[in-house]
Image: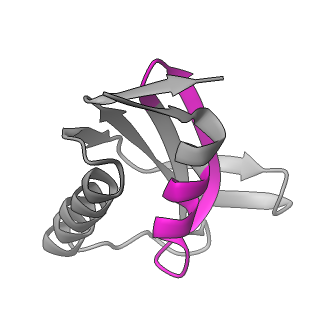
Amino acid sequence: MKTYSKDDVINTIRDLLQNVTEVESIEHVADSEFSIRIIISKTDTLPVIPTHSYERFIDTFGSALGHKFNSTGSISSTGDKVEYLDSKSGEYWTRQINVNLDQVNVEG
């Protein structure tokens, strides 16, 4: 089992999602578990993400992450919710994605 710093994992997640979706935050929860909050849209519109497209996004993201760390794992996500984001000074629809890498040690 290979060991990575939490910053290495966070930076890899951010790099994989760059130009794909807007990332509000990535947090190291515990061990090899990370929580990613993505921005869906402003609240002046209803968030519309076709289920098939989102499932494909999650599958592709999971595969790319597993390949980067030579690991299997699990990904789950919450429903959309409205949050006030200080970084954007407004209310936005967001979604939480939880990632757990099985064969990776994370330090720091």
Asked whether 22 falls inside the magenta stretch, the response is yes
> Residue at the spot x=57%, y=29% of the render?
28
Depth order, front residue of 10/36: 10
Q: Residue furthest top?
A: 30
* Above or below, 56 relative to 107: below
Query: Percent from the top left, x then y, of residue 72?
Result: 19, 40
Tell me which residue sits at (60%, 65%) in the image: 43
Residue 62 is situated, as x and y percent measured from the top left of the image, at 26, 55
Q: Residue furthest bottom?
A: 19
**Residue 52 horizontal/vertical position (percent):** 13, 71
Q: Which residue is found at the position 50% from the left and 55% from the top?
A: 13
Location of residue 55 (image quadrant): bottom left
Q: Give the magenta-colored segment's residue range.
A: 11-33
**In this picture, residue 57 sits left or right of residue 78:** left
Q: Which image quadrant: the N terminus?
A: top left
Q: Is residue 24 magenta?
A: yes
Outermost residue on the front side: it is 2
Q: Quadrant of the C terminus?
A: top right
Residue 7 % position (x, y): 65, 41
Identify the residue at the far left of this view.
Answer: 52
Name the residue located 46 percent from the left edge and 18 percent from the top edge.
31
45 and 8: which is toward the camera? 8
